[in-house]
Amino acid sequence: LTVPIKKLNLDLAAWPMMIVRPTADGALDVELSAESYLAFVHLTSDRADLIFSDNFFDLPAGDRRTLRITGATPVAPADIVVRCWNGR
């Protein structure tokens, strides 16, 4: 980027669409997609044992990204929250 992130013209109402699929081994596959550009998409959790296959990325309009979330015990959809800078 050639401008500071705070100067980007972000759609403040934009939010990732999320489809969550539990796996047989207790993990979650999370598919994120965007209708408009999303900056610094990331997943958070209160669970310290979770491992995210990817985190903190930009998601261009029309793109999809699938992440795998694993933990010491099975991961539930309620264990994760998706956020992005658009809706700071």
Image: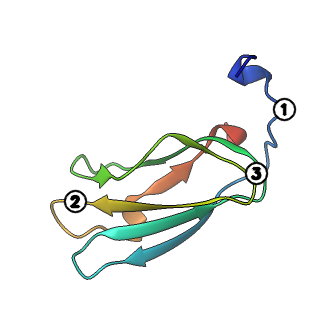
Q: Quadrant of residue 70?
A: bottom left
Q: Quadrant of residue 84?
A: top right
Q: Which mark is residue 35?
A: none
Q: Position of residue 58 (x, y in %)?
A: 61, 42
- In which quadrant will I find the C terminus? top right
Label 3 and label 1: CA atoms lie apart by 12 Å
The tag earlier along the polypeptide, 3 or 1, is 1
Asked if marks 2 and 1 touch (Cβ < 8 Å), the reply is no
Instruction: Determine whether the residue tagged by mark 3 lies in a helix, strand or loop.
Output: loop
Q: Which mark is residue 71?
A: 2
Q: Which mark is residue 14?
A: 3
Q: Looking at the picture, does residue 8 appear above or below residue 52?
A: above
Q: Is residue 13 left or right of residue 70?
A: right
Q: Is residue 84 left or right of residue 78?
A: right
Q: Position of residue 60 (x, y in %)?
A: 70, 49
Disc 3 crowd, CA 10 A, few/some/many (<14, 14-19, 20+): some
The tag earlier along the polypeptide, 2 or 3, is 3
